[in-house]
Every structure is written in structure tokens, then in C-alpha cells.
Image (cartoon, rainbow, N blue to C red):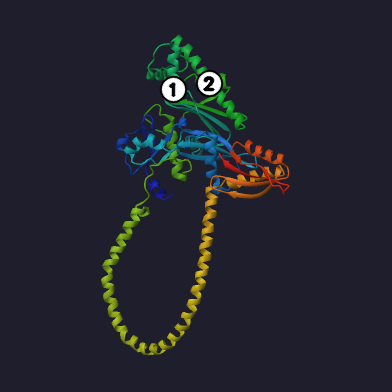
């Protein structure tokens, strides 16, 4: 990383919540609210995150036979199909390989993010901070708890974090990301659902204050009844997600279950974990500031601080989705290199006249000795002319050979270009031909000729049995990816074979 040295010089970490635009600054083990408008671009490392619900994620297998250099392309092609992505939208697609017993296929966790999302979500932040050094997804922030030794890596840990505009569940095994899912119950949605059950309007912030102060045991009996019903639904849903994750990722048990919220700990929620999940819960609270002035800091900001510290140690950009990195040092930039080169050229221009003067004096001194050498060289000149005459004849012969070799070289270049085009523009034709030939051989039909055009493949087929030709055409048609057409099946009077030219297009 070209600007890693400049990043190491940053003295503080600034965390930004992209939804609320709330920011904190971490400096010398103290974390406190920060005004983004007063950011010091030269000394602050800026970190933020993408909401879990803005990331499309899934897992699928892909053949180990695919070369490493082609793996990213293969994953992107399969992701558009497996994840149902809109082909008209550009996505940033990344993946993490999981341990798998299958020796023939890789098991991958794949993540897709709308390429325009970072710009639309973070442009307002960027205008205040100038740079955003690191952006990752919310579930990935949890990995820093292990890299910074806040949590031990052994065992399987599940995290649930309820935010005002988002919520997510994430599972880590042995300190490594395994699975995550955005939850449909954010704090805002829980608040709205509560109002629906209650049949009256409770202001959103009042509801949050109620949860923060009284937790799950409200003093109002009516409120208490509907809150219990609502959180029962929430934990039943979380249980369904856990059942799916355990089955899909071979999870025997959850060793630790952490739950928390943006508004702080919700007292009494641990009883729901035991009742609906059968798990003892731990507070989602990993405060690292020894002198924080606030009683509670949204844990996403704590996780962002830990993630930034990890990044400044490792400079791993594999899950860094920012498009607002600070430029490298002046002498590493293209513009800087240009200005340095221009300066050197200017100095050279000034030095040139002085060089010419000194060099002219040197030439005058050397002129006398050179004149003496000239007499000797003149004698050799005549001999050289004779040699040159012979070389000229050889040169003519070599030029003719060179011309012939250049023609061969041009032919090979053209051939390589055609091979390259075939390889890159029609990577599936080899697979299609293999499929068609395999079907032809299975029916015992003879393949007389193959013609490959841009949009179709024409097969000239021969068979002594007209029925086999007909059945082969049905085989082709049964493949939904092929569009098959043929004018007729004919048999010449003197021939014992039926023939047909079949046109195959890939739909």
C-alpha cells in the first residue's frame, strides 16, 4: 500500500455513523463526540460502515478446478445468477472462503454491494472529512474483537445488535467470520409495531427512553403486555435464523450469545434469550476507553475504533469498500512525479550552456590529435568502402529474409489475436460444443462438419437411421439454453445416410 507510511503518522481515529452522521473521536484512550466540520484531515483516520441490510450475502460452492486468476470472474458470474442481482446495476462483489470437507468444490461466503451505494451514502460525510480511509460492512466490524484480543478466538459466538435503522445477526467461529443476516426488526420497526399493537401513538424517542430506563419490565401493565408479545415475536424470528444458520453451516452449538442495542443495554432481555433460544446472553458492550465521559457509547463506534486499529497494523484492504482514500505522498503521485521531472529538466536546461562551453574547449584541445588520426583513418577508409560494398550485398539478402520472417510474424500475431478473441469473447463455445458432440455421440449419429459463426453453430449430421436424427434434435431442444432449427432431413437416392444441417443458437 503506497500511502501506508502516511497513515501510520495519523494520531487519532474518527468514527462516523452514516445514518445519524454522529461522530466520535478516539485519542489517547479517550472517546468523545466529535464535530465533523472541525476535522483535521492531516491527523485523523476516518472510519465508517455500511448497514447490514444494504449488503446482499449468500454462500455457494464453486469448482476447485477454476484457476486462482479466474476465480473472481467466476464468482461474479455465479453471484449474479445465485443472488438474483440486477444485471443493469454494477455491484462490488467480494467473497470469503470457508473451510469445507468437499475436495472438488470451494465453499464461499459471497457479498454484493451496489457500487453507487458508497457514493450516495457517504458523499455528505466526505465533504466534511475530505477522506474516508476505511468503510466495511457492519458484521465485519466484529472481527476486530478477535484481532485486538478483546474476545478469545475459540468457540462459536453469535452477536445480535439492534439499531434504530438496522439490525443484524452475525456468527463467528474460532475468531473468523462465518455468517450474517440483516434482521427485519430494527428499533424503529419495533417501535412502530408496538404502536400498532397498542392502538395509540408513542413517539419513537419516548419509546427508546422507556426501553432504556425500564427495560422489559414496564410499570404500565398494558405497555408490558404488548412489549412481551412483540419481543416474543422478535426472538422467535431470531431463533428461526439461528436454526437456518446451524443447519447450513454445520454449527453444533452456540458457545456465547451477545445481544445489545444502539440505545444501550435493555434490562430483562436475557430472559427472552433463555426462553426462546435456550442461550445465556452476554452484554454487547466492549468499551475500550478508560475515561469516556458518556455513560454509554453506541457499540458500532467502539467496533469501528478497533477495526481502524487493526487496519493500521495490517493494511488489509480485502473488505475495505471506500472510494475516498487519501492520495499517496507527493513523490508517489503522477502529478508529483511530473513536477519533479519538470524541475530536473529545468535544472538541466540551465546547466547545458555551461556544459557546452567546457566541452567546446575540450574539443579544441583534442582537434590536433584527431587530425593526425585522420590521416591514418583515411587510408583505412578505402579498405572500409570495399568491405561496405560487400556488406551492402549481404544486407540486401538479409532484408529479403527479414521481409519473409516479418510476414510470418504478422501472420502469427493475427492468429494470436484471433485466439485471444475466441478465448475472451466466446469462453462458453468449447463447453457448448462438448455438450452437443456428447449428445450426438450418445445417439450414434455421425458429425460430418461443424461451422462456428458469431451467433450460432451449424452441425452437419449423418445417420443411417432417420429416427436417431429426430431423437437427437429432440435432445437438443430439451436443453432450454439452445434454440435449434433445421430445414429438413434428406436422403440422397444413391446414399444410405440421412443428412441434416442443424443450426444451434444459445439463448
At a point 32% along the width and 38% down the height, the residue shown is: 127
| Residue in the foreground of this view, choosing between 143 and 406 | 406
- Is residue 286 visible to us here? no
Q: Which mark is residue 235?
A: 2
Instruction: Tell me where residue 115 appears, x and y as whole percent.
Output: 43, 38
| Residue in the foreground of this view, choosing between 8 and 364 | 364
Q: Residue furthest front?
A: 493
At a point 60% along the width and 47% down the height, the residue shown is: 430
Whether residue 356 is situated above or below residue 126 in the rendered picture: below
Residue denoted by label 1: 187
Instruction: Tell me where residue 19 appears, x and y as whole percent.
Output: 38, 30
Sequence order check, earlier mark of 2 and 1? 1
Instruction: Tell me where residue 487 appears, x and y as whole percent.
Output: 61, 41
Q: Are marks 2 and 1 in contact (CB under 8 Å)?
A: no
Instruction: Tell me where residue 307 appears, x and y as whole percent.
Output: 45, 38
Indicate left or right for 104 with 183 as reference.
Answer: right
Amino acid at each position: 500500500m503506497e500511502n501506508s507510511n502516511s497513515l501510520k503518522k495519523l494520531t487519532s481515529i474518527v468514527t462516523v455513523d452514516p445514518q445519524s452522521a454522529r461522530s466520535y473521536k478516539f485519542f489517547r484512550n479517550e472517546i468523545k463526540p466529535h464535530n465533523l466540520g472541525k476535522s483535521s484531515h492531516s491527523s485523523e483516520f476516518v472510519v465508517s460502515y455500511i448497514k447490514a441490510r444494504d449488503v446482499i450475502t449468500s454462500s455457494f460452492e464453486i469448482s476447485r478446478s477454476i484457476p486462482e486468476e479466474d476465480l473472481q470472474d467466476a464468482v461474479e458470474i455465479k453471484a449474479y445468477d445465485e443472488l438474483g442481482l440486477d444485471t443493469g446495476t454494477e455491484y462490488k462483489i467480494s467473497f470469503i472462503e470457508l473451510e469445507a470437507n468437499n475436495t472438488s468444490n470451494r465453499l464461499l461466503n459471497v457479498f454484493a454491494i451496489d457500487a453507487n451505494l458508497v457514493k450516495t451514502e457517504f458523499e455528505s460525510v466526505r465533504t466534511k472529512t475530505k477522506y474516508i480511509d476505511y468503510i466495511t460492512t457492519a458484521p465485519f466490524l466484529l472481527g476486530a474483537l478477535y484481532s485486538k484480543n478483546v474476545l478469545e478466538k475459540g468457540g462459536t459466538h453469535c452477536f445480535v445488535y439492534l439499531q434504530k435503522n438496522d439490525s443484524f445477526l452475525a456468527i463467528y467461529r474460532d475468531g473468523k467470520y462465518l455468517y450474517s443476516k440483516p434482521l427485519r426488526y430494527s428499533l424503529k420497526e419495533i417501535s412502530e409495531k408496538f404502536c400498532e399493537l397498542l392502538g395509540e401513538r408513542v413517539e419513537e424517542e419516548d419509546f427508546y427512553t422507556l426501553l432504556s430506563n425500564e427495560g422489559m419490565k414496564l410499570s404500565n401493565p398494558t405497555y408490558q403486555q404488548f412489549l412481551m408479545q412483540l419481543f416474543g415475536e422478535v426472538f422467535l424470528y431470531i431463533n428461526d435464523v439461528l436454526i437456518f444458520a446451524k443447519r447450513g453451516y454445520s454449527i453444533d452449538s452456540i458457545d456465547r450469545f451477545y445481544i445489545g442495542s444502539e440505545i444501550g443495554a435493555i434490562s430483562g432481555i436475557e430472559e427472552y434469550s433463555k426462553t426462546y433460544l435456550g442461550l445465556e446472553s452476554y452484554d454487547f458492550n466492549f468499551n475500550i476507553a478508560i475515561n469516556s465521559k458518556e455513560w454509554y457509547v453506541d457499540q458500532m463506534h467502539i467496533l469501528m475504533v478497533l477495526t481502524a486499529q487493526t487496519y493500521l497494523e495490517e493494511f488489509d484492504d480485502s473488505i475495505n469498500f471506500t472510494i475516498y482514500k487519501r492520495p499517496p505522498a507527493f513523490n508517489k503521485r503522477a502529478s508529483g512525479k511530473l513536477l519533479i521531472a519538470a524541475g530536473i529538466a529545468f535544472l538541466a536546461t540551465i546547466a547545458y550552456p555551461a556544459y557546452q562551453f567546457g566541452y567546446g574547449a575540450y574539443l579544441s584541445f583534442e582537434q590536433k590529435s584527431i587530425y593526425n588520426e585522420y590521416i591514418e583513418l583515411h587510408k583505412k577508409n578505402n579498405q572500409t568502402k570495399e568491405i561496405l560494398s560487400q556488406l551492402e550485398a549481404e544486407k540486401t539478402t538479409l532484408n529479403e529474409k527479414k521481409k519473409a520472417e516479418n510476414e510470418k510474424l504478422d501472420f502469427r500475431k493475427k492468429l494470436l489475436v484471433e485466439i485471444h478473441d475466441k478465448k475472451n469473447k466466446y469462453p462458453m463455445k468449447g463447453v457448448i460444443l462438448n455438450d452437443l458432440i456428447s449428445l450426438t455421440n450418445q445417439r450414434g449419429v455421425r458429425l460430418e462438419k461443424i461451422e462456428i459463426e458469431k451467433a450460432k453453430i451449424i452441425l452437419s449430421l449423418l445417420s443411417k437411421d432417420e429416427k436417431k436424427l429426430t431423437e437427437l434434435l429432440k435432445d437438443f431442444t430439451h436443453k432450454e439454453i439452445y434454440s435449434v432449427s433445421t430445414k429438413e432431413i434428406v436422403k440422397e437416392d444413391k446414399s444410405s445416410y440421412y443428412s441434416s444441417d442443424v443450426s444451434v443458437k444459445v439463448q
